[in-house]
Image (cartoon, rainbow, N blue to C red):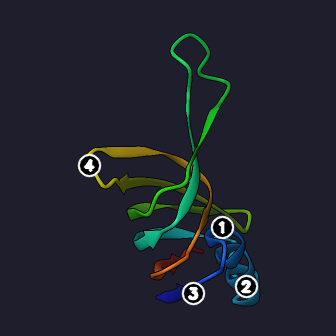
């Protein structure tokens, strides 16, 4: 299992993509993503057009949990973010920046 530590000031998707390339992982399962971020961009699909994305940006500190897969060296992560008021934001992760805490991503390479 590959453990990717995303440190303060780093962008999650960029760091994960770089680490996958460094470790030669082109296929696999992202079995867990855990941590907290200070901003994120996630998308969901509009009700009447599942082929497009509605991307939203959130700029409050958020607790994070997710999972996904690696295909052709590209991470595909779906995540849930907890907000200050106890509500949740979820969707396909496009970007997230670590500010005060950390994010850890656990990857099992496929064949």
Q: CA distance from mark 1 to mark 4?
A: 26 Å
Q: What residue is shown at x 51% (from left), y 15% (from top)? A: 47
Q: CA distance from mark 1 to mark 2?
A: 16 Å
Quarter holding residue 63: bottom left
Q: List the residue tagged with mark 1.
A: 13
Residue 67: x, y in percent? 43, 62
Q: Answer few, some or many: residues within 10 Å of disc 4's Cα (few below 14, many 20 plus, some between 14 and 19).
A: few
Determine the secondary structure under disc 4. Answer: loop
Quarter holding residue 109: bottom right
Q: What residue is shown at x 55% (from left), y 76% (from top)? A: 99
Determine the secondary structure under disc 2. Answer: loop
Q: List the residue tagged with mark 3.
A: 7
Sequence order check, earlier mark of 3 and 1: 3
Q: State yes or no: discs 3 and 1 in contact (Cβ < 8 Å).
A: no
Question: Vertically, is 73 above or below 40?
Answer: below
Q: What residue is shown at x 50% (from left), y 78% (from top)? A: 107
Front tag of 2 and 4: 4
Q: List the residue tagged with mark 2.
A: 24
Sequence order check, earlier mark of 1 and 2: 1
Sequence order check, earlier mark of 2 and 4: 2
Determine the secondary structure under disc 1. Answer: helix
Residue 46: x, y in percent? 56, 20
Q: Horizontally, is 15 left or right of 103 in the view?
A: right
Q: State yes or no: discs 4 and 3 in contact (Cβ < 8 Å).
A: no
């Amino acid at each position: 299992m590959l453990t990717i530590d995303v440190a303060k000031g780093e962008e999650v998707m960029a760091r994960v993509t770089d680490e996958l390339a460094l470790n030669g992982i082109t296929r696999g399962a992202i079995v867990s993503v855990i941590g907290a971020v200070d901003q994120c961009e996630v998308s969901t699909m509009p009700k009447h057009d599942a082929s497009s994305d509605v991307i939203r940006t959130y700029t409050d500190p958020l607790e994070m949990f997710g999972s996904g897969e690696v295909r052709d060296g590209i991470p595909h992560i779906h995540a849930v973010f907890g907000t200050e008021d106890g509500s949740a934001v979820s969707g396909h992760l496009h970007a997230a920046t670590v500010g005060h805490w950390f994010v850890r991503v656990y990857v099992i390479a496929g064949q």
